[in-house]
Every structure is written in C-alpha cells, then in structure tokens.
Amino acid sequence: MWRVIIVEDEKPILGLHARLLETYGPFQVVGCFESPFDALQEIPKLDVDALLLDIEMPRMTGLQLAQTLVEDGIDVPVIFSTAHQQYAVQAFRVQALDYILKPMTPNTVRQLDERLQKYYGQKQKPISKKELYVQLYGEAYAKHGGHLIKWPTRITEELFYYFLLHEYKLCLKWRIIDDLWPNVEEKRALPNLYNTIYRMRQLFMELDMPIVIDRINDGYMMNTNSSIVIEPKEKPDALLLETKGYLWAYRLESII
C-alpha cells in the first residue's frame, strides 16, 4: 500500500484524484491539500511514499514546492500533475519520478503503481541474469553488460561502493554524511544525500537491476538481491578502492 499526499488547488480535481488512487490502485491518501503553503508545513510530519503535486498553483507552483521540500531534506519521490505537457522538462529538473496529465484515469493509477514498484525495487523477477561485476580492490570498477557503469555523478558512484561494503547493515544518515560530506553544512548535506539516493534508484531502475535501497528510520540499507558479482583481486597487495581515494575506505580497510 503506497502512502501518498496530494497537493492540488482545484478541489474537484483533488477529490477525483484521491478517489481514483484509492479505488483503482494500492494507494492510501494520507493527506489532501489545496494550499501548497499548508502542505509545506504538514508534509515533514507525515510518513509517505510519494507526493502528487499540481504544477500550476498560484503564489507557489508545484515545482517551487518540490524544490523547497528537497532543500529541506524530504526524501520522497515526486509525481507532478499538469494540464500542459510542456512542463515536463522543468519537472524533471527537480528530480521528479514522473509526471502525469490531468485529470487522472484508472490506467494512470496503474502506471503510477508500476513506476513506484520499480523505483522502490519491489517488483522483481524471480530469475534475473542481469548482474553487475564489481572490482573492489586496486583498479576499482563496476560493469554492466561488459561496459563500465556511467554514473550520473561521482558522489553517486561513491555512495554505491559505500552501501555495497555495508550491505545488509543499517547506515545511519548522519554517519553517511560524516563519511561522504565531511565539510558540508547539515542544511546542504541532507539534500545532497537524498538527491544522490534518488539518482542511484533511478539508475538501477534504468538498468533493470533488482538492487533495493530501503529507508529505515534515520538510515538506509542496501540489498543487492544477489545481482552483484565481486571480482577476485588482481594483485594480492591491492588496497580497497585504491584508485578511488575515498578516505572512509582507507579507514574501513584497517578494520577488515
């Protein structure tokens, strides 16, 4: 059951979308707001899986609302609703999971369910031959289909290795920030962490990899679902992530 919040300034559309989500999909609408300002105050208090935001709202658009929430460290995928398709490019600049044209239909609801399943890694094939081949020592790399992974950012790659070396262990977000963003103030570090996890999930979804990053209380845990093959050391004296220069990896090497 996906817990969602809807922000829509047109009351009839707000009611229609709430009914459609709960009637035709595994959705629980935990909050409905006509005012983005009211939503901005209440969203941080609620535990949700997705936000459905109208783009065209007076005084504060859905794009502005999403940007503010990201800057405040809200780690929830955003789905925009709009009557105008030209907003799509702008929507994805604030890292939207998807956008839909309103009014919503039952088919739209089913598509949103599938999109969220892929994003959260909950819809997995029982047998998958797709694997990542990862070298952790010396010349470190991650390959998919014989090609090096094209990471969206350097920090996305670093966080992947961090989670991989802590697989099945709860990584508290404050510890992650201390290790990967040691010189960044908290107000900036939290959005950086959330945005990087978003990029990782998007990448795994595009690669059709059953890698799941679960949010658990104040931390995260990665489960690769046996989709990663660790390559053997090429040299016996090779160091952990030697070519990457991650300080946390050197500290981890000393205790392995």
Image (cartoon, grey):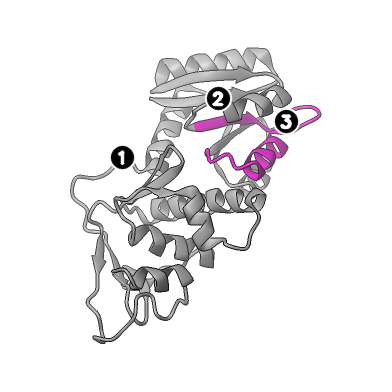
| Nearer mark to the viewer, of 1 and 3 | 1
Q: Quadrant of residue 117?
A: top left
Q: Of the residues shown, which amino acid type is indicated by label 3?
A: Glu
Q: CA distance from mark 1 to mark 2?
A: 22 Å
Considering only order in the chain, which callout, 3 or 1, is on the residue closer to the N terminus?
3
Badge number at residue 57: none
Q: Secondary structure at mark 2?
A: strand
Q: CA distance from mark 2 to mark 3?
A: 17 Å
Q: Secondary structure at mark 3?
A: loop
Q: Is residue 65 magenta?
A: yes
Considering only order in the chain, which callout, 3 or 2, is on the residue closer to the N terminus?
2
Q: Of the residues shown, which amino acid type is indicated by label 1?
A: Lys
Residues shaded magenta: 50-76
Q: Is residue 138 left or right of residue 66?
A: left
Q: Residue at x 77, y 32 (%)?
A: 60
Considering only order in the chain, which callout, 2 or 1, is on the residue closer to the N terminus?
2
Q: Quadrant of residue 181?
A: bottom right
Q: CA distance from mark 1 to mark 3?
A: 32 Å
Q: Is residue 194 left or right of residue 36?
A: left
Task: Read off the residue under disc 1.
Answer: 123
Task: Read off the residue under disc 2.
Answer: 5
